[in-house]
Image (cartoon, helix red, strand yellow):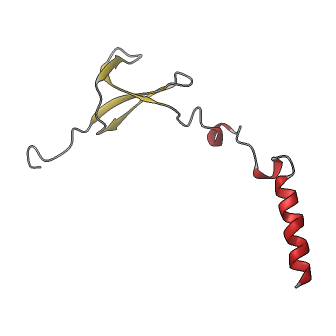
Amino acid sequence: MKEGIHPNYREVLFVDQSNGFKFVTRSCVNTKETAKTDDGRELPLFKLDTSSESHPFYTGTQKSVDTMGGRVEKFRNRFAKAGAKK
């Protein structure tokens, strides 16, 4: 590999701000802060707003479109009538 043309690919500690979930993975992300991992290593820190531990899609708390207070049912009824006229 040529020197000086590749990004700084290293281990980074990612922290989910909503629930404190931490994980370490390799990344090129630029960071200004560092933090200690559970095993005592000092790694660059990147703070996340959401991760797979807190995102509604992955946690199973996402609301279905069908359960949104009848709006979907009103839409289906309106266009079922329009389709029957044809």
Q: Nearer the viewer, residue 30 or 39?
A: 30
The percent position of residue 67, horizontal first and vertical second, equals 82, 47
The percent position of residue 68, horizontal first and vertical second, equals 81, 47
**86 vs 12: above or below:** below
Quadrant hosting residue 4: top left
Quadrant hosting residue 77: bottom right
Q: From the viewer's perspective, is 46 left or right of 32?
A: right
Q: Nearer the viewer, residue 52 or 48?
A: 48
Residue at screen point 74% across, 43% down = 63
Instruction: Name the quarter where the C terminus is drawn.
Output: bottom right
Outermost residue, left side: 3
**29 vs 69: above or below:** above
How many labels, in total? 0
Residue at screen point 52% across, 21% down = 20
Residue at screen point 50% across, 24% down = 17
Q: From the viewer's perspective, is 49 left or right of 10?
A: right
Q: From the viewer's perspective, is 43 left or right of 62?
A: left
Residue at screen point 34% across, 30% down = 12
Quadrant hosting residue 53: top right
The percent position of residue 35, horizontal first and vertical second, equals 35, 18
